[in-house]
């Protein structure tokens, strides 16, 4: 029986569905950078390490230089993993320019069904709970799906920028919570 999509902390309950989603992303070459680099065989063998890596930057842990606290959130429905978001609790100089507070991906087989928009809406609720007042979200100007997801959640365009270290023009949006 399927429920409503909800945001959860990464958990071994979704192991098979999550790994299948990583396979999908790698087969299509479309997803967040780390998703495309994960070694699926290693994930199968040691999923606890995957979960630990996803929790690595949560508050309470020491941070390497240049990192901020952040948390990973998974969008799930019933037993199915649908996508993930990363919520940075603060910005640093780099994230203010590129990356912002929130990054996300929807597994390829679940795209264009409204899940990206729902996942960002739920992640914004979580950000509000954490006390954030305004969040920055960045996306490539050519990423029409991501633009629609942000705009559908009330994103206000700061502008479109060309960065020395990034090959594509980047859009920065702000959402007031
Ligand atoms: C971007 C992404 C998260 C969108 O997720 P999604 O679940 O397909 O989004 P939704 O179904 O909520 O779609 C939102 C809107 O965008 C539109 N849309 C989605 N993908 C699109 C695409 N590739 N081209 C044009 N429009 C698109 C939808 O039609 C919908 O339009 P509407 O608001 O008029 O109804 C997903 O494509 C993805 O994971 N891409 C790879 C990773 C990525 O780019 N992450 C964002 C980095 S900034």
Image (cartoon, rainbow, N blue to C red):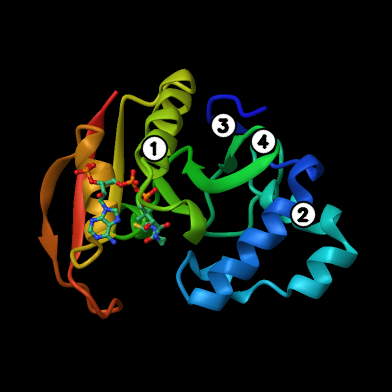
Q: Residue at x 62, y 59 (%)?
A: 21
Q: CA distance from mark 2 to mark 3?
A: 18 Å
Mark 3 Cα-neighbour bin, 10 Å: few <14, some 14–19, many ≥20: many
Residue 63 shown left or right of residue 89 in the figure: right
**Residue 36: horizontal and vertical position, in percent?**
56, 73
Note whether 13 is above or below 15 in the view shown: above
Marks 4 and 3: in contact by CB < 8 Å? no
Q: Nearer the viewer, mark 1 or mark 2?
A: 2
Question: Are the two marked residues, 1 and 3, in contact with CB atoms closer than 8 angstroms?
Answer: no
Considering the image in quadrants, where does the C terminus appear?
Answer: top left
Comes first in the chain, label 2 or label 4: 4
- Rounded to the nearest angstrom, the CA distance separating label 4 from label 1 is 15 Å
Is disc 1 placed on a helix, strand or loop? Answer: helix
Residue occupying image coordinates x 57% and y 59%: 65
Q: Which image quadrant for residue 94?
A: bottom left
Spatial CA span between label 2 and label 4: 16 Å
Q: To which residue does mark 3 refer?
A: 7
* Mark 4 vs 1, N-terminal side: 4
- 40 horizontally vs 84: left or right: right
| Residue 76 tag number | none
- State the residue at coordinates (59%, 41%): 74
Residue 9, numbered circle: 4
Q: Which residue is mark 1?
A: 120
Q: Position of residue 111 (x, y in %)?
A: 41, 53
Element carrying mark 4: loop
Sequence-first tag of 1 and 2:
2
Asked if marks 2 and 3 touch (Cβ < 8 Å), the reply is no
Q: CA distance from mark 1 to mark 2?
A: 24 Å
């Amino acid at each position: 029986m399927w429920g409503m999509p909800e945001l959860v902390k990464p958990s071994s309950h979704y192991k098979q569905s999550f790994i299948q989603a990583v396979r999908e992303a790698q087969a299509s070459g479309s997803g967040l950078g780390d998703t495309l680099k994960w070694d699926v065989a290693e994930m199968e063998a040691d999923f606890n390490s995957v979960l630990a890596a996803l929790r690595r930057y949560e508050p309470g842990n020491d941070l390497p230089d240049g990192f901020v606290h952040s948390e990973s959130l998974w969008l799930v429905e019933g037993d199915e993993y649908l996508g993930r978001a990363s919520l940075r609790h603060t910005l640093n100089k780099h994230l203010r320019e590129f990356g912002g507070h929130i990054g996300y991906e929807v597994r390829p087989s679940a795209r264009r069904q409204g899940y990206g928009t729902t996942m960002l809406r739920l992640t914004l609720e979580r950000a509000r709970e954490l006390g954030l007042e305004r969040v920055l979200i960045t996306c490539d100007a050519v990423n029409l799906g991501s633009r629609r997801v942000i705009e559908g959640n009330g994103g206000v365009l700061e502008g479109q920028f060309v960065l020395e270290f990034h090959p594509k023009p980047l859009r920065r949006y702000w959402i007031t919570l």
